[in-house]
């Protein structure tokens, strides 16, 4: 497992990202999930998640008690935000509601 170093920058906490995790640009979208923090590229931030979802096997089954996992909560949150914006992908809908 790779790690990143935390440090203080003034009154803010910052992260030294390994080179392979660096973003282009000078800003990212940030989302807190319980005690986790997710950083996404500012340009089309949710595309990263949708690209990852396309890699799920067709046979994926998610039980209702698994929705407490922070990553699944993020995906469901993103899905509903995009769904209300008219951008949801039917494949994601099928994964969660079949």
Image: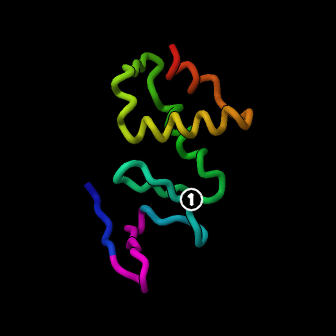
The magenta segment is 7-20
Q: Position of residue 78 (x, y in %)?
A: 57, 40
Crowding near the residue tagged with mark 1, few <14, some 14–19, many ≥20 C-alpha atoms within 10 Å: few
Residue at point 58%, 68% (across, down): 27
On screen, 51 above or below 66?
Answer: below
Q: Is residue 16 magenta?
A: yes
Residue furthest to the left: 1
On screen, 22 above or below 78?
Answer: below
Q: Position of residue 91 (x, y in %)?
A: 59, 23
Residue at point 60%, 45% (across, down): 47
Residue at point 48%, 41% (across, down): 74
On screen, 94 above or below 77?
Answer: above
Give the quadrant of residue 26: bottom right
Residue furthest to the top: 98
Q: Position of residue 70 (x, y in %)?
A: 39, 41
Q: How is the image coloured?
A: rainbow
Residue furthest to the bottom: 10
Q: Position of residue 93 (x, y in %)?
A: 58, 23
Residue at point 36%, 81% (across, down): 8
The number of numbered discs placed on residues in the rendered structure image is 1
Residue under numbered circle 1: 29
Label 1 SS: strand
Q: Quadrant of the N terminus?
A: bottom left
């Amino acid at each position: 497992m790779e790690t990143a170093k935390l440090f203080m920058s003034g009154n803010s906490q910052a992260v030294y990202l390994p080179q392979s995790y660096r973003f282009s640009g000078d800003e990212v979208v940030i989302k807190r999930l319980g005690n986790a923090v997710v950083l996404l590229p500012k340009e089309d931030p949710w595309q990263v998640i949708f690209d990852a979802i396309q890699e799920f096997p067709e046979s994926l089954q998610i039980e209702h008690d698994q929705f407490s996992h922070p990553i699944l909560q993020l995906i469901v949150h993103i899905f509903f935000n995009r769904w209300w914006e008219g951008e949801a992908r039917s494949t994601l809908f099928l994964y969660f509601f079949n």
